[in-house]
Amino acid sequence: MSEYKAKVYYRAQVAQDYDAVRNHSTYRRYKWHREYQVLDKILEQLPSDLRLLDIPCGTGRFFPLIDEKSMKFMGADISQDMITQASSRASSCRNFEGFTQADAENLPFEDNKFDFILSMRFFHHLPADAVLKILREFRRVSKHGIIMEAPITQPISRILMALAGAKRMSWDAENELKCPLFPINKREFLRILRSLNLELAVCYSVTWFWGQNKICVLRKL
Ligand SMILES: C[S@@+](CC[C@H](N)C(=O)[O-])C[C@H]1O[C@@H](n2cnc3c(N)ncnc32)[C@H](O)[C@@H]1O
């Protein structure tokens, strides 16, 4: 198993404050709103009789949206404190089928159990070896593929970020034990997907202009 900060960080007060922190500036609210919009568009294009696994579900930010689409879904996270925060959202969802506390590297589910895996704000926290293990595990437990959020750069976003003087990454990169894979350029991302027998079906920008934050639909080959 890989060790990295996000595995143990989202506990106690951090879990309690999670939603408030992500709501406390205009930009953060905008980002949350855009994630919702993009995900809405993606789910709208899928049949409603699907079963999803939201992992890591965190505080269940996307539970109401999945529920609205009449899709069955479960939530999983390594942090019991995040699951506790998510439980009030889950209790008002008709199509929610339960929580599992689990490490994404080793899921307690049989092959093809879910139609799609949904994974938001996760991959940029992970060292490279964990990304590969987790994508393999997500592929194994999904029938059709993975809906994932990650920073994927294109030449234009790299130029704009450089002009804005943005640093390459946040605390994740600075404190990692191993090299983080994300942000990754699109060509390298596609190469990794091919090696895992996945293909990029569609990829939407979460934010405009600087636009490296993407939500992608990966299909199993
Ligand atoms: C930034 S939060 C994202 C939560 C949620 N997807 C969202 O968009 O709000 C990262 C989450 O990853 C969970 N996590 C970290 N490592 C994990 C692992 N190996 N397996 C499952 N969950 C993990 C943390 O507990 C935390 O809830």
Image (cartoon, rainbow, N blue to C red):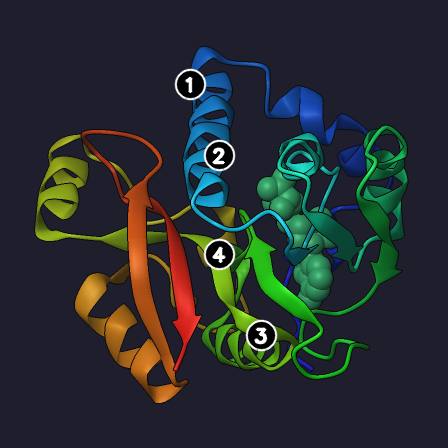
Q: Residue 39: percent from the left, percent from the top?
A: 48, 39
Would you place residue 48 above or below residue 36 in this image? below
- Pointers 2 and 4 in contact (C-beta within 8 Å): no
Task: Name the amino acid, label 4.
Answer: Ile
Front-most of 112 and 27?
Answer: 112
Q: Which residue is mark 3?
A: 143
* Closer to viewer: mark 1 or mark 4: 4
For this rendering, which residue is in front, 142 or 86? 142
Residue 122, given in percent of the width and then of the height, sits at 55, 54
Mark 1 vs 3: CB contact within 8 A = no
- Residue tagged 1: 27
Where is residue 8, by image quadrant?
bottom right
Is label 3 in contact with label 2 (beta carbons under 8 Å)? no
* x, y percent for residue 124: 47, 55
Which residue type carries mark 3? Answer: Lys
Residue carrying label 2: 40
Q: Is residue 160 left or right of residue 146?
A: left
Marks 1 and 2, the one that precedes in the sequence = 1
Q: Would you call the spot at circle 1 few (<14 residues within 10 Å), some (14-19), or many (20 or more)? A: few
> Which residue, given by chain and number where applicable, does mark 4 sit on?
147
